[in-house]
Image (cartoon, helix red, strand yellow):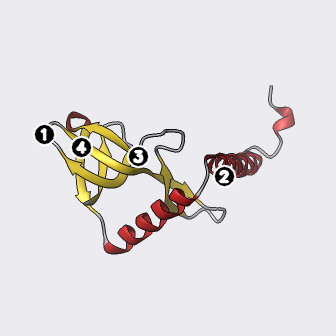
Amino acid sequence: MIRAISLMNGEQIIGNVEDHYESFKVFNPFYIVETINEDGLAGSKLTNVLTFSSSDYIIVSKSHVVFEFPISKAMCNYYEKLVSLYDKKSSDDIVNEALHEMTQAETRYEKLMAMLMPDRSKLN
């Protein structure tokens, strides 16, 4: 069953969850990452946990879980579409996308810093 898991360290994971005695086995896990777009609006995106792994699941100890819950039908459809897309992509494509996202994030942070400290040349 597709569920979301909230961990003690604040991370949230979504995936196809099998409940075991002391752990959850999570197939096709994605992190739920909070984001802010260029307009300053908050949102969430899903990032594949296993981008660089040959495995298709992770084991999460129940002792590290704060709570877990079923997700909405719309989020379930979104998740399933992402899983399907990742199944079709090569590792190189995924790495290149990650690098592109990092570059975009760096540009956004530089713009934000320029707004917060417009005259950085006077800083030591």
Q: Is residue 78 left or right of residue 101?
A: left
Q: Is residue 68 left or right of residue 10?
A: left
Q: Which residue is mark 3?
A: 56
The amino acid type, in three-letter code, at marker 4 is Phe
Q: Dot 4 lies on which element?
A: strand
Can you give x and y, in whole percent of width and height, for residue 118 in the image? 80, 46
The tag earlier along the polypeptide, 4 or 2, is 4
- Identity of the residue drawn at 32% across and 73% down: 73
Disc 4 to disc 2, C-alpha distance: 29 Å
Q: Is residue 11 left or right of residue 90?
A: left
Report the disc number at residue 91. none
Tell me, yes or no, whether the two marked residues, 3 and 1, touch with CB atoms within 8 Å: no
Q: Which residue is mark 4?
A: 24
Q: Residue furthest right?
A: 121
Disc 2 to disc 3, C-alpha distance: 18 Å
Q: Which residue is mark 1?
A: 21
Q: Residue furthest bottom?
A: 74
Q: Is residue 41 above or below residue 116?
A: below
The amino acid type, in three-letter code, at marker 3 is Asp
Q: Dot 1 lies on which element?
A: loop
The tag earlier along the polypeptide, 2 or 1, is 1
Q: Which residue is mark 2?
A: 93
Disc 2 to disc 1, C-alpha distance: 37 Å
- Identity of the residue drawn at 36% across and 54% down: 14
Tell me, yes or no, whether the two marked residues, 2 and 3, touch with CB atoms within 8 Å: no
Q: Residues within 10 Å of mark 2 (few under 14, many from 20)?
A: few
